[in-house]
Image (cartoon, grey):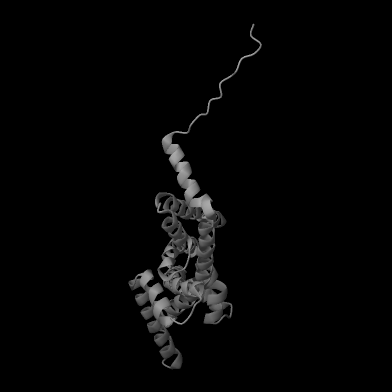
Amino acid sequence: MYIGCKVPYVVLALPSWLQQLKDDFTLNFIDDKRYMYLVKGLGATLEITFFAVLLGIALGVVAAIIRSSHDKTINDMRPGFGKVLLKVLNTIVKLYLTIIRGTPVVVQLMITYYIIFASSTNQIMIAVLAFGINSGAYVAEIIRSGIMSIDNGQFEAGRSLGFNYVQTMTYIIIPQAFKNVLPALANEFIVLIKETSISGYVGIQDLTRGGDVIRSRTYSAFMPLLAVAAIYLLIVVFFSKLVSILERRLRNSER
């Protein structure tokens, strides 16, 4: 007579490749809380990008106004100090644009860190300056193209309202130019996020450097580099989606 029966206890083993992935994940991210290298690195990357964008926009707006003002008004200006000053400023801006756009950003970063601010220990500030100055050159051309695309009739409309040149640029031209180039500026922000991945050249522990630190601890390159690439991809996809929404709203507002 059978009173009961024993059910065998079966342990299902993971496939070897899946077990290997699990072990690699644990080794690279869970053990010793190594994922914190990526978290801290992401924070540094976003901080550098945010302040570099602000600096780049400020420099870009100033440079764009000088360049566009020179192109639009230099032939109509009377000889004098104002005309000479505008020519000098335009020459300086053109030199700035030529140098910055003609040299690699990694070289600019290293010059800023090892030469210009060699005595400074504020690595984040140095990176912000280097990337902000670099971004400003590209933002300048983006905004200048927006200003030059505005019909000259808008300047005439400003004069008819009693505005001088500065007031016309401030209240009429610049707002329209920004609206036209806002998607391009947003794309520049996305490009800048990826450019900051070279911050590790000057010892900053950004997102890319965080993955490299994990690799140096575990001697495993696959997981850390894949994680860094995935995080950058998610950031770019997120902001690209925002840009597409912005472009759609701008198109709808023009109807």
Q: Nearer the viewer, residue 242 or 117?
A: 117
Measured from the top left, where is residue 136 in percent x and y? 45, 72
Q: Is residue 248 visible?
A: no
Q: How many marks can you see?
A: 0
Give the residue drawn at x 35%, y 70%.
104
Which residue is drawn at the image coordinates 45% and 38% (left, top)? 18
Question: Which of the two residues, 50 or 83, is positioned nearer the viewer here?
Answer: 50
In the orientation shown, which residue stands out farthest toward the right? 3
> Given the current orientation, which residue lies at the most extreme left position?
102
Quadrant into which the N terminus falls: top right
Residue 142 at x, y = what percent? Answer: 44, 68
Which quarter shows the C terminus? bottom right
- Return the residue nearer the eye: 160 or 185: 185
Residue furthest out toward the top: 1
| Percent coordinates x, y for residue 212 in the rendering | 43, 59
- Considering every residue shown, the one lying at the far bottom of the view is 80
Q: Quick check: 120 above or below 35? A: below
